[in-house]
Image (tube, rainbow, N blue to C red):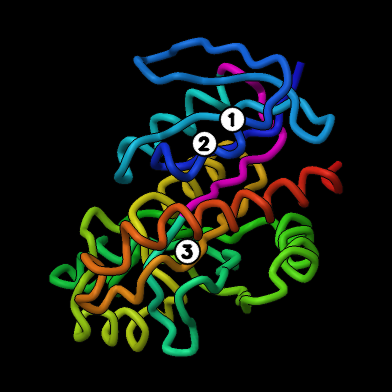
Amino acid sequence: MSYIGILGAMKEELDLLLQQMEDPRTDRHGGIAFVTGKLRGRSVVVSMSGVGKVNAAVTTQLMIDRYQVTSVLFTGVAGAVDPNLQIGDIVISSSCQQHDMDVRALGYERGVIPYQEVSDFPANPALIKLAKQACETVCKDHRYMIGRVLSGDRFIADRSAVKDLYESLQGACVEMEGAAVAQVCYMNQVPYVVLRSMSDKADGSAHVNFAEFTVQAANRSSAILNEMLGQIL
């Protein structure tokens, strides 16, 4: 049996989906909980990866190996990097790249993984299209953007860092897991897309905005994902 894989880094990002699941069953692999069941009539497996790229990569690989997932959808919150984005807006990943992969001292461009052909991992076009259609249905009061998701093991909360990520890597938003999920999916030839709702502007106000908007933003991402599940093949 195959599943659609759904991942989030934090409990708040998955609570609404888990509450809506039919016939949920929980198994643990590598100390990580994987919940199987039905959403919108689709067989899904949902897991909280935990924060950071290593956690995300391990959880994604276990999900692929154990559940033969046909696609992976990552839902959650992020900090806006593109100045046109506001809190509550949605980013659909065109691709994902690690902003903290930095081997410029050896002649590589920032974000490039040495000895690999691909470092900016493209999301699946069909899943991007479904996410776009879902946003047009669900996000009546907020905009969406298709753009590059930047990931790194650092919580960005500095205006100069945001400016640098936008100008140097053309990022739309920044978070801590997406590029790891994307790389694992790419290596396993599994389609993926990342959906991020902006909880803050990654500009030093995160301590004010993050807690307040995380639940709202996560619920918005979950609503989009639910809409996608109704259409996904």
Residue topped by disc 2: 15
Seen at 26% across and 84% down, the residue is 164
Tell me the tag on residue 120. Answer: 3
Q: Is residue 192 above or below residue 197?
A: above
Query: Which residues, given as a range, are shown in magenta?
Result: 66-76
Give percent across and percent down for residue 167. 35, 88
Under mark 2, the amino acid is Asp
Tell me the tag on residue 85. Answer: none
Seen at 31% across and 42% down, the residue is 51
**Disc 1 secondary structure class:** helix
Q: Is residue 81 above or below residue 129?
A: below
**Disc 2 secondary structure class:** helix
* Image position of 226 (left or right of 115): right
- Can you say which quadrant of the picture contains the N terminus? top right
Residue 188 in which image quadrant: top right
Q: Is residue 35 above or below residue 196?
A: above
Seen at 40% across and 75% down, the residue is 80
Residue 213 in which image quadrant: bottom left
Under mark 3, the amino acid is Asp
Seen at 30% across and 45% down, the residue is 52
What is the CA distance from the residue labelled 1 to the residue labelled 2?
5 Å
Under mark 1, the amino acid is Leu
Residue topped by disc 1: 18
